[in-house]
Every structure is written in structure tokens, then in C-alpha cells.
Image (cartoon, rainbow, N blue to C red):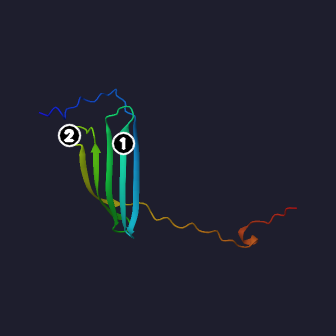
Amino acid sequence: MASSSCWRPPPDPRRLLHIALVELSFQQNITHGVIFILSLGSLKAFNELDPWLVNGGVQFKIKLYKVLSLYTGVTLRFGNVPATNFRKLDTVSNLSLSVSFESAKSKPQEPEYGRVGETGLKPTLKG
């Protein structure tokens, strides 16, 4: 049986929450293939004073190959009114393998300027 301090009434499907999310993220290249990422975020409801959530995380992206990267990091989540089966402070550790399907973009080619007869353009006279 759950203690009375953790018990919450069931959610009301008619209740509407108006929520704002504020995020701050910082990326820094450490070396050619390693990127450090720091992120902070806050989630706050406008129409209820009680629930709010703060997230903070540190992540490293390590490029292994042209299209293959490894992500590893830790995220801390604090909620003053946690959801059922969650604590006020939770930690999430991650280790992910990422494959990028984006092809490398080629540089735009500069137009070659030739003589008037080579481009097919005719000179116009303004007078």
C-alpha cells in the first residue's frame, strides 16, 4: 500500500494546463571529432502554481566514422510534484549510436563568365 504522501488523485481529463518551456543549450567543439553539449531547461504551468520541472544535462558526441557517431551523457530531472512512480530527482544515463543519412553538401559552383558569343547572350544598347 502506498504511503499517503505519495498518493495523488487520478488525473482529470477536463483539466487544461498552459505550459511554457524555456531551454538553454551550449555546444563546444573540444577536438575535431568530439563535441561537448550542456543543456538546461525548465517547464512551468501558468494556470497552476504547484507543478514545475527543471532539467539539466551533459552530453558528449564522438564522431567514429563519416556517418557514425557515439553519444554519451547524463541528465538530471527535478520535479517538485513528480508523476506517479517517479521521485523528485531522477537521473538518466544514456549511451547511443547515431547514423547520419545526410549526404555532404557540395560547394556551389561559380558561374563561368565567357565572351558574349559563348554564352548565347546578346549585348543590348541603351541610349
Q: Which mark is residue 52?
A: none
Furthest-right residue in view?
Answer: 127
Answer with left or right where residue 86 lies relative to residue 21. Answer: left
Which of the pair 54/98 is nearer the observer? Answer: 54
Residue receiving disc 2 = 85
Q: Position of residue 13 (x, y in %)?
A: 32, 28
In this rendering, is residue 97 above or below 44? below
Which of the pair 91/107 is nearer the observer? Answer: 91
As measured in the structure, the alpha-carbon distance from the residue carrying label 2 to the one carrying label 1 is 19 Å
Say which quadrant the C terminus sits in. Answer: bottom right
Residue at x 40% of width, y 57% of height: 26
In this rendering, is residue 84 above or below 92? above
Say which quadrant the N terminus sits in. Answer: top left
Local crowd size for mark 1, using a 10 Å CA cut-off: few (<14), some (14–19), many (≥20): some
Secondary structure found at label 1: strand
Residue receiving disc 1 = 43
Residue at x 66% of width, y 71% of height: 112
Quarter of the rendering containing residue 33: bottom left
Whichever of labels 2 and 1 marks the residue nearer the N terminus, that label is 1
Furthest-bottom residue in view?
Answer: 115
Q: Which amino acid does the dot numbered 1 rest on?
A: Leu
